[in-house]
Amino acid sequence: MIRFSKAVSSLRTSEIRDLMGLAIRPDIISFAGGMPGNELFPVDEIDEIYNHLPLDIKQTAFQYGPTPGYPPLLESLKEYLKKKGMPVETNNLMITTGSLQAINILGKVFIDPEDTVVTENPCFIGGISAFKSYQANIHGIDLNEDGIDVPSLKASLDRNKSVPPKFLYITPNFHNPAGTLYTEQRKKELVPVLKEHDLPLIEDDAYGELYFDEEARKRVVPMKTLYENELTICYTGTFSKILGPGFRLGWMLVPPEIYQKAELVKQSMDACSPNFTQVLANEFLRSGKMEKYIERMRVIYKRRKDTMAAAIRKYFPDEITWNEPRGGFYIWLKLPPQLDIMTVLKRSIEKGAVFVVGKTFDPEGKDNSHFRLAYSHTPEEKIEKGIQILGDALREALTVVK
Ligand SMILES: Cc1ncc(COP(=O)(O)O)c(C=O)c1O
């Protein structure tokens, strides 16, 4: 018998990954994958960038690079983050292979087997799997409309003072899957609780650039910017949602002490992130093309969100409740208690639309009272059709239970 490690034995397959197979079937309208639409990628801009690179830079692109990242990209990203008020001078920046690797590295830096870490519930599935792979016990704290439930967090930390968790992991901007944008007040309320319990924060900002309105723009300011002097904050970001996940490029901005450990971990994982895509991302960022591209994407994703929201109002039964997101990729919907989402999913796939069930994002893998729809990947004309299909599946399932 093959003797697997305890760490891999505790991993379960992600329903997102399983459903990806279906998501690429041409006849299915997919609201499953949290990714940009293929037709939105800046292919021409990247073609042009590559074709105009000097030979020596092209050769560098094919080569291994330094573990912390391609130096020109580190510089241009630093400038970019500095413009947003991020504390780039007192922290260290590292390029990672997607921000999932940044989260994974931080997991490895902090977690010993059986340690507890705290996350939101629901939580990004990649975070759950990364922390589980180091055999952490994950304690999920409910997320509501304004952010993580601070009284519950405080009560849990007070109760478990003898075995304090290693960190809190949150996604304050356009949460995956919940779409939540933290209020300023909620971020402020978190500070004394984290301080009292000396709890480091991992702040995942994968979607902060993709706001849809002015108020949302004002609210996406990272805690790393606001509370740098009061808390230990490890900030992660990614090019995946603002350039392309295929680049596999993300970053972490962390205090020097943590950076030293993280660099050792990255050395042992992959030595360096792809130089090829770092060279291209650097030119994209440095030339100002990225900012223009993101501006265009905000308009397109907002239109997709508006289309999906209008279709939900038109086709879904009133028993399904949800909040309209102000940015990002997702709408998170709550089912009435009697409805079984697996029945709805099966029916919906038969009819031609797919989405992700809620328990995928529950650290305990149990709570199936919600489901997630991603509007980012689907052109508007298909969104309305897919929502109609899903609405039919929901109504049928409701009629059966009534
Ligand atoms: C909240 C969140 N964080 C991190 C990631 C990781 O993205 P990547 O590894 O492509 O940077 C994702 C991807 O879906 C995400 O939704």
Image: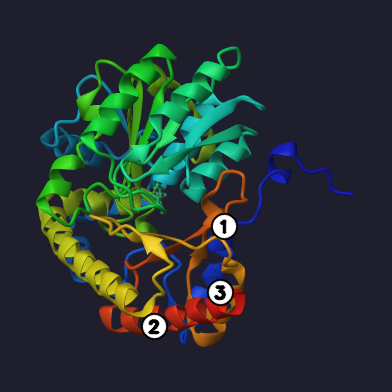
Q: In this rendering, would 342 be left or right of 251?
A: right
Q: Can you give x and y, in whole percent of width and height, for residue 150 in the image?
A: 39, 29
Earlier sequence position, callout 2 versus callout 3: 3
CB under 8 Å between discs 2 and 3: no
How far apart marks 2 and 3 lie (CA) works out to: 13 Å
Specify the amino acid type for callout 2: Gln
Which residue is drawn at the image coordinates 24% and 38% (left, top)? 183
Q: Can you give x and y, in whole percent of width and height, for residue 356 in the image?
A: 50, 64
Q: In this rendering, would 358 be left or right of 150?
A: right
Instruction: Look at mark 1 in the image and give the residue it sits on.
Output: 368
Q: Secondary structure at mark 1?
A: loop
Instruction: Look at mark 3 in the image and give the residue it sits on.
Output: 344
Q: Secondary structure at mark 2?
A: helix
Instruction: Look at mark 2 in the image and give the residue it sits on.
Output: 388
Specify the amino acid type for callout 3: Val
Q: Quadrant of the C terminus?
A: bottom right
Q: Quadrant of residue 14?
A: bottom right
User: Is residue 353 shown above or below 65?
Assistant: below
Q: Residues within 10 Å of mark 1 (few under 14, many from 20)?
A: some
How far apart marks 1 and 2 lie (CA) works out to: 22 Å
Earlier sequence position, callout 3 versus callout 1: 3
User: Is residue 276 shown above or below 167?
Assistant: below
User: Is residue 307 shown above or below 36?
Assistant: below
Q: Residues within 10 Å of mark 3 (few under 14, many from 20)?
A: many
Q: Quadrant of residue 284?
A: bottom left
Colour convention: rainbow
Q: Residues within 10 Å of mark 2 (few under 14, many from 20)?
A: some
Pick whichever, 130 or 374, lies toward us.
374
Q: Can you give x and y, in whole percent of width and height, for residue 65 in the image?
A: 37, 40
